[in-house]
């Protein structure tokens, strides 16, 4: 038995000692460098040591997939569904639960700005992301409300060498994307500087567009109104970090701006004018992360941040004969909504000397305020104050328990005690994890007080909503073994969610308007599995999931209580060491999603969102200081998804195409990344 000790510098810049045991068969218990996780952990640790079941997406996977934003990555994940609203953006569901129950963090700070309950994940760029950590199931003890279905934490890059890193990346896609971004990272002694930014531009897309078309002047006729609107994004982030033996201080400042142009159809009778909508989203974030050690050796960490989110909508009357424009005088056509969010979370982790166990005590403070003419009384706020504690109890070398408890005060809703219990058992090549968590989600300000009414939406808040309560059970088994051909891993899991007073959109009686209501009861359950093989040259993964969503109508009618939908995926990467290149394939099949409706006479009818497949193939070639990527995306040419049995009233968003917009058509892309590292290496 050979005993090795590795000292690693990772994202948190704290020194973490991980012991790896390698026996005579060369089986490695930890993937030391690439699979260290920090989300909801007492201390950074190898992913196999985490009591939580964590899925990790590395920067290598992001590069191999040529992903631009979070939507590009998550659309290929098992047990996740990405949906699209061409005005509200892309949203994610996990374990059969919608995005309003998914907590999205960047370096531990929540992302705000939910529209129709969801964060637009196409606004979250991956220019400076080192890895993405995904924990399925509630983390309400650590992160409070909105963390029922799961938590997604994006970890930013940090420099680990004194050599400066300067990268410039350009990207073109035939569907109409023209992107350029950069990042500059410099480490000097205890100081770490970082600057990144970029511009992403999409010139819009229509199903009848040619395969390759560059921007040009066109006649202002009926072709001016397109399915996927013109979009432009600018983003920048400035960060600094100082590290000493006992403390690390990391302040940051970031800004994001997105503008969407929705051109209207020329109006009858002479098609000489139109109404155009302009949507502008602006995010401004400032915060600081602090981490350190007490002289006693116990760790502490603290994060404090302020996030400002603004969304402005203006409607203009356009004279198509001379392209002059003027803002309309209808009050409902103009709107500016602003959300301010203050948060602070801190904790202390004490190492119990009598054992390898640890205990954590922490606080979590959140305050959100909104202003706008579409907010009831023009201004509203909600706050949440909480204390939480978790502990990791090592009963022996194989078995670890992690109980947790959160006590909180919500300014608008009574907050219950929120408990959780996780365990992990590992023996040789097997790791078994199980968890129970109690979830609590207070309605958001938008669900309570926001009105969103335009030609495509008619959504009204409901200030009488009840808070959601949930019970979640997860169980997983991972079998990993080292063979002569490489590392084989078989990963299987199952889950069950039970939610009371689930908040959902429904049509109000005798009206075309939609409002938020408490559904009463919702359940979801499912199975998921992954098989992976990692060799020196070839990595492959085959995954599947089978998710069932509760049919509320089954409580009154004789129908199946659950509607199940399958998913399958494949991803493979092959390295050509001789030419320093690689090819990657990403495929996913999203099965049909059935649902039930009640008509006006009380009869039950069944509908379905059709199945579809996504296929991307990417080739990457690396040179001394340059990386060239090109390939095809959406090669099965999926555009709009058919919906059968749709209610006659339509939905909150009406799509003129008669289906559900999912992707723009088949496209080819090329990307060139220049690395001006002083070492001259990628």
Image (cartoon, grey):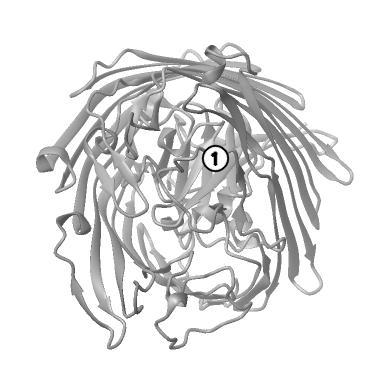
Report the residue that reaches farthest toward the right. Answer: 484
| Near-viewer residue (646 or 152) | 646
Q: 314 or 304: which is nearer to us? A: 314
Question: What is the x, y in percent for residue 162?
Answer: 45, 66
Q: How many marks?
A: 1
Mark 1 falls on what kind of element?
Answer: loop
Q: What residue appears at the point 58 percent right and 68 percent down from the top-left corner?
A: 207
Q: Name above or below for residue 141 compared with residue 649.
A: above
Quadrant in the rendering for residue 231: bottom left
Residue 480, placed above or below residue 471 = below
Judge whether residue 35 can be spotted in this image. Answer: no
Residue 467 or residue 315, whichever sits in front: 315
Percent coordinates x, y for residue 489 in the rendering: 77, 36
Q: What quarter of the picture does the C terminus occupy?
A: bottom right
Mark 1 Cα shell of 10 Å, populated few (<14), some (14-19), many (≥20): some
Position of 214 with respect to 383 (left or right) is right
Q: Residue at x 31, y 59 (%)?
A: 240
The picture quadrant where one finds residue 670 is: bottom right
Q: Give residue 105's position: percent from left, percent from top.
A: 40, 43
Kindly identify the residue that appears in the image at 79 percent across and 36 percent down. 27
Q: Height in image: 6 above or below 273?
A: above
State the quadrant of the N terminus: top right
Q: Is residue 165 left or right of residue 49?
A: left
Q: Residue furthest front?
A: 269
Which residue is drawn at the image coordinates 81% and 51% (left, top)? 535
Which residue position is annotated with label 1? Answer: 646
Image-based side of 264 in relation to 121, left or right:
left
Instruction: Where is residue 71? Give x, y as percent.
Output: 52, 53
């Amino acid at each position: 038995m050979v005993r090795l000790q590795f000292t690693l510098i990772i994202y948190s810049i704290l020194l973490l000692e991980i012991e790896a045991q390698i026996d005579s068969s060369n089986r490695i218990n930890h993937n030391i460098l690439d699979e260290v996780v920090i989300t909801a952990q007492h201390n950074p640790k190898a992913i196999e040591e985490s009591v939580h079941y964590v899925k990790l997406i590395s920067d290598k996977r992001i590069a191999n997939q040529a992903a631009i934003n979070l939507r590009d990555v998550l659309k290929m994940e098992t047990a996740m569904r990405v949906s699209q609203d061409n005005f509200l953006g892309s949203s994610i569901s996990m374990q059969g639960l919608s995005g309003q129950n998914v907590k999205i963090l960047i370096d531990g700070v929540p992302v705000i700005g939910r529209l129709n309950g969801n964060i637009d994940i196409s606004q979250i760029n991956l220019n400076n992301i080192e890895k993405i950590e995904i924990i399925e199931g509630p983390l309400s003890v650590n992160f409070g409300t909105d963390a029922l279905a799961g938590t997604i934490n994006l970890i930013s890059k940090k420099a680990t060498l004194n050599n400066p890193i300067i990268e410039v990346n350009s990207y073109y896609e035939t569907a109409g994307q023209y992107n350029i971004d950069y990042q500059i990272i410099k480490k000097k002694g205890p100081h770490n500087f970082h600057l990144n930014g970029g511009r992403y531009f999409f010139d819009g897309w229509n199903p009848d567009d040619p395969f390759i078309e560059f921007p040009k002047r066109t006649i202002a006729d009926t072709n001016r109104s397109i399915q996927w609107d013109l979009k432009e994004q600018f983003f920048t982030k400035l960060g600094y970090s100082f590290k000493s033996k006992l403390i690390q201080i990391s302040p940051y400042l970031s800004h994001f701006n997105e503008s969407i142009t929705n051109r209207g159809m020329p109006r009858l009778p002479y098609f000489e004018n139109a109404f155009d909508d302009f949507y502008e989203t602006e995010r401004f974030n400032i915060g600081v992360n602090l981490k350190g050690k007490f002289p006693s050796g116990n760790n502490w960490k603290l994060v404090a941040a302020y996030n400002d989110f603004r969304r402005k909508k203006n409607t203009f009357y356009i004279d198509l004969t001379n392209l002059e424009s003027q803002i309309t005088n209808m009050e409902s056509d103009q709107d500016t909504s602003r959300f301010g969010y203050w948060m602070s979370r801190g904790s202390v982790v004490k190492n119990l000397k009598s054992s390898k166990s640890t205990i954590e005590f922490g606080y979590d403070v959140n305050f959100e305020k909104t202003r706008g003419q579409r907010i009831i009384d023009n201004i509203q706020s909600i706050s949440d104050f909480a204390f939480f504690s978790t502990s990791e109890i090592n009963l022996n070398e194989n078995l670890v328990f992690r109980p947790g408890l959160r006590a909180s005060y919500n300014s608008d809703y009574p907050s219950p005690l929120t408990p959780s219990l996780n365990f992990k058992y590992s023996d040789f090549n097997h790791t078994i994890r199980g968890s129970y968590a109690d979830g609590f989600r207070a309605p958001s300000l938008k669900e309570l007080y926001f009105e969103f009414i335009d030609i495509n939406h008619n959504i009204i808040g409901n200030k009488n909503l009840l808070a959601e309560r949930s019970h979640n059970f997860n169980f997983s088994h991972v079998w990993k073994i080292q063979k002569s051909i490489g590392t084989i891993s078989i990963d299987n899991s199952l889950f069950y969610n039970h939610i009371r007073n689930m908040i959902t959109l429904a049509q109000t009686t005798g009206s075309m308007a939609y409002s938020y209501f408490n559904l009463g009861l919702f359940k979801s359950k499912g199975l998921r599995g992954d098989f992976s093989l990692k060799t020196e040259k070839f990595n492959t993964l085959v995954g599947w999931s089978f998710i069932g969503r509760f049919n509320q109508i089954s409580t009154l009618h004789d129908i199946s209580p659950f509607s199940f939908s399958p998913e399958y995926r494949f991803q493979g990467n092959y390295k050509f060491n001789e030419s320093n290149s690689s090819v990657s394939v990403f495929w996913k099949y999203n099965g049909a999603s059935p649902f039930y409706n009640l008509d006006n006479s009380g009869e039950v009818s069944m509908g379905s969102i059709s199945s579809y497949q996504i296929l991307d193939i990417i080739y990457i070639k690396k040179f001394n200081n340059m990386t060239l990527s090109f390939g095809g995306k959406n090669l099965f040419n999926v555009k709009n998804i058919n919906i059968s049995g749709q209610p006659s009233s339509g939905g909150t968003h009406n799509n003129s195409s008669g289906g559900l917009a999912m992707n723009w058509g088949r496209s080819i892309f090329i990307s060139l990344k220049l690395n001006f590292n002083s070492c001259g290496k990628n």
